[in-house]
Amino acid sequence: MSEQEMNKEAIVQIENVSVSYRLPTERIGSFKEYAIRKLQRRVKIEDFWALVDVSMTVNKGDVFGIIGNNGAGKSTILKVISRVLKPSKGRVVVRGRIAPLLELGAGFHPELSGRENVFLNGALLGYSREDMEKVFDEIVAFSELEQFINSPIRTYSSGMYARLGFAVATAHVPDVLILDEILSVGDEAFQKKSRERLQSFQEKGSTVLMVSHGLDSMITMCNRVAWLDQGKLRLLGEPSEVVAAYREDNA
Amino acid sequence: MEDLSKPVYDSAEHKNSAISELKELFNYRYLLGQLVRRDVTTRYKRSVLGVAWTMLNPLGTMLILTFVFSNFFRSEVQHFPVYILSGLLAWNFFTQATNAAISGLVWGGSLLKRIYIPSTVFGVSAIGTALVNMVMSLVPLVIVMLIDGATFHLSMLFLPVSILLLTGFTLGFGLFISSLAVFFPDVGEMYQVLLTGWMYLTPIIYPESLISAQLLPIYKINPMYWMVKMFRLPIFDGRLPTLPEVLPAIAWSLGMLIVGWLFFTSRSEEYAYRV
């Protein structure tokens, strides 16, 4: 295979995926209610379809953007890809390691030191001790927390907290990086640094999947954009064309 | 690219969830260790005596119970503190681990909505933490035995087997109850009431001889009756359990472990939706 063809390798395949949530009002909260409904054969739950029959392929090296209004299913599709939600129908195949950057510092414990939290957070993301030891110094340097790394994280400012979270989540170069609107971390200097790191990932061959409301940045950053509308795929293609169609629809 | 294994995820693979969960848990064994570490070290992080409370806690409970109940039972049971403490060892392990399994899954729920983690990791790490606490609470047991002048029997070498049996039962029950608690939030509260009743229905703080002969067969339905026996016989009675005593414990341990694991993993894909 030539290099051109190698680059065309599908890294994420989504085939006819549908996802249904149960509506919160339909949640059966007590045994009594459950028993009564079961007896009446009314345990039938009304489904809300967050995604309906969506198919798309993300190729290796793509910077793939997903746009759409609130509730269009953008976050749901990221969750399906990052293995958090199993699709109700259809199939998802991912060929590589995924790094979700959904919420930074998820799972940090306030009483533990920055150092302990780095290892705990890395473990939650599925890394081993060796994986984390290799990148530990790099994480500390990148987050600029050398002086504070042995202090409990409850003493950190929210900026320090986010910086450490970002540094851990991006410590290893992933095959697929998932971004859910978190590009603004810390002060301006750190934002620049984090953008550069994400760019270096692309140069190293990572595939990026991102959700954003900033349409202009989608045009400049992505090479393909998908537009989701009420759980359905409306359009997929050239960023400028898809964004233009989306803007027209919302005008 | 760094040298990381490249997992391939295919949602359409029809894997046996009970077995594949075991495999995923093995992949996440470092997380298990980290969670146990977190729970052991943070529990008393801001208290002056720190981890020592793990030992002082059962000691205090034992002192109170001995003081309160010595008037009633002392004449019947020699070395009453050892009697109580050997039973509490098993009971505290069970309540701690099952409660931690519930709160762990509820805490982890916010994570399960964002990143993939094998969901049994919370129940299993709860067991790990309880094991650490149990080993530490062996220290006050030994101290009390020395002060009380109780004999250290060779039969105490059976304790690893007792711990293994109790671990199996507790893990199975913890997975079962935490899974229920996800679907019915009231279960967490109900369970506290259940535990109180359960404790009084198990001969932990009163001598077994107080149970009337007619009621004894009913008491023996209680799995914790057998689990407590596995600890009390080698420590307090100074003998190995007989086959009729150990068989119910093995059956409960294995049976609950299998039922709990199957029950939990058959629903593991729903937790991200429901927690």
Image (spheres, coloured by chain):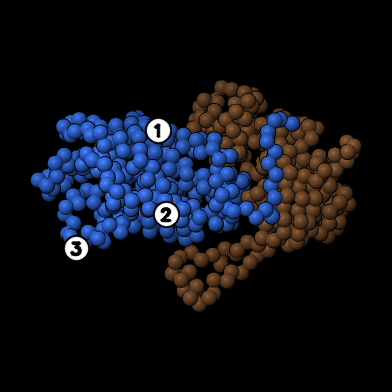
Chain of the residue where label 2 is placed in the rendered structure: B
Q: Secondary structure at mark 3?
A: loop
Q: Quadrant of residue A180?
A: top right
Q: Are marks 2 and 1 on the same chain?
A: yes
Kindly identify the residue that appears in the image at 68 percent across and 63 percent down.
A49
Percent across and percent down for residue B150 are 18, 34
Percent across and percent down for residue B195 are 33, 54
Q: Find out whether the residues at labels 2 and 3 contact each other: C-beta distance under 8 Å.
A: no
Report crowding for label 3: few under 14, some 14 to 19, many 20 or more residues within 10 A (C-alpha). few
- Which chain is assigned blue? B
Relative to residue A163, is residue A51 depicted above or below?
below
Kindly identify the residue that appears in the image at 46 percent across and 34 percent down.
B37
Report crowding for label 1: few under 14, some 14 to 19, many 20 or more residues within 10 A (C-alpha). few
| Sequence-wise first label, 2 or 1 | 1
Q: Quadrant of residue A7?
A: top right
Amino acid type at mark 2: Gly
Amino acid type at mark 1: Arg
Which numbered marker is on residue B46? 1
Residue placed furthest toward the front? B243
Of residues A211 and B171, the one nearer the viewer is B171
Amino acid type at mark 3: Gln
The residue where tag 3 is placed is B214
Chain A display color: brown
Residue placed furthest toward the bottom? A40
Of residues B43 and B25, the one nearer the viewer is B25
The residue where tag 2 is placed is B255
